[in-house]
Image (cartoon, rainbow, N blue to C red):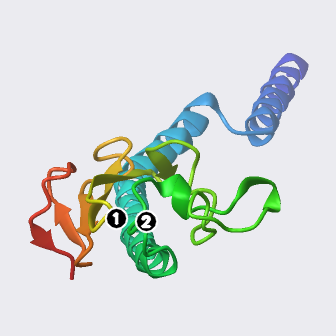
Amino acid sequence: MKDIVGTGAFIGATRRASTLTRQRGFSLIELLIVVAIILVLAAIAMPNLIRSKISANEASAISSIRTINTAQVTYAVTYPLVGYADDLAKLAAPSGGGPATSMNAGLIDWVLGCASQPCPKSGYSFRILNANGTPVSSYTVVGTPQRLDITGSRGFCSDSLNPVKYDPAGGIACTEDVR
């Protein structure tokens, strides 16, 4: 009888020990399930995050094109013998804080008015093309995605007449009006 009771006590102690072991933490299977759920949620959220980033970059590109157009009008009025600027650096602030000249008019920030075109900003590259005449009487400003469908999906263009248009393919063949 004593052996049976002793055996029962041993079995009961073993069950309690295994119950305590299970309660100490998560099993590998439980952790894998949680990781799988997190990965599924991330896979669902990622395309929306990329679309919202592209949308923000495109809004910034449209704003930058309009800023350049405004700076071009101011530049042409300030320097009538030169006309419009044929390079974004001419619209930028002078390096070293010197006075504004036709080579550095101080009309746009240093990001858009970088030293050499194209000037990168918010996933887009900007440059002035087709600056014609002496003084320069016409120009085209373009902004194209640095990485198509990652930083932007449309290219944007404008000219001395100021309407901003876009190219749905991301290039500079702009035909559609921005609304």
Q: Residue at x 26, y 68 (%)?
A: 158
Which amino acid, mark 1? Pro
In the rendered image, the vertical position of residue 158 relative to residue 89, given as above or below: below
Is the residue 39 above or below the residue 73 in the image? above
Q: Position of residue 171 (x, y in %)?
A: 20, 48
SS category of the residue bearing label 2: loop
Residue at the disc numbered 1? 135
Q: Position of residue 113 (x, y in %)?
A: 55, 57
Q: Which residue is mark 2?
A: 82
- Residue sitting at x 28%, y 62%: 139
Question: Does residue 11 appear to the left or right of 55 in the view shown?
Answer: right
From this view, report whether residue 72 is shown above or below residue 77: above
Structural crowding at the residue carrying mark 2, measured as other residues with C-alpha within 10 Å and reported as few (<14), some (14–19) or many (≥20): some
Q: Earlier in the sequence, mark 1 or mark 2?
A: 2
| Corner quadrant of residue 173 | bottom left
Give coordinates of residue 121: x percent, y percent.
51, 54
Is 73 left or right of 23, judged from the image as shown? left
Depth order, front residue of 33/10: 33
Q: Residues within 10 Å of mark 1 (few under 14, many from 20)?
A: some
Residue shown at the point (73%, 36%) measured from the top left: 22
Q: Quadrant of the N terminus?
A: top right
Of residue 37 and residue 15, the one placed in the foreground of this image is: 37
- Label 2 is placed on what type of residue? Val
Quadrant of image for the C terminus: bottom left
**Disc marking residue 53:** none
Whether the residues at callouts 1 and 2 have beta carbons within 8 Å, the answer is yes
Task: Tell how many labels.
Answer: 2
Q: Residue at x 56, y 63 (%)?
A: 102
The answer to whether residue 104 of the structure is visible from this angle is: yes
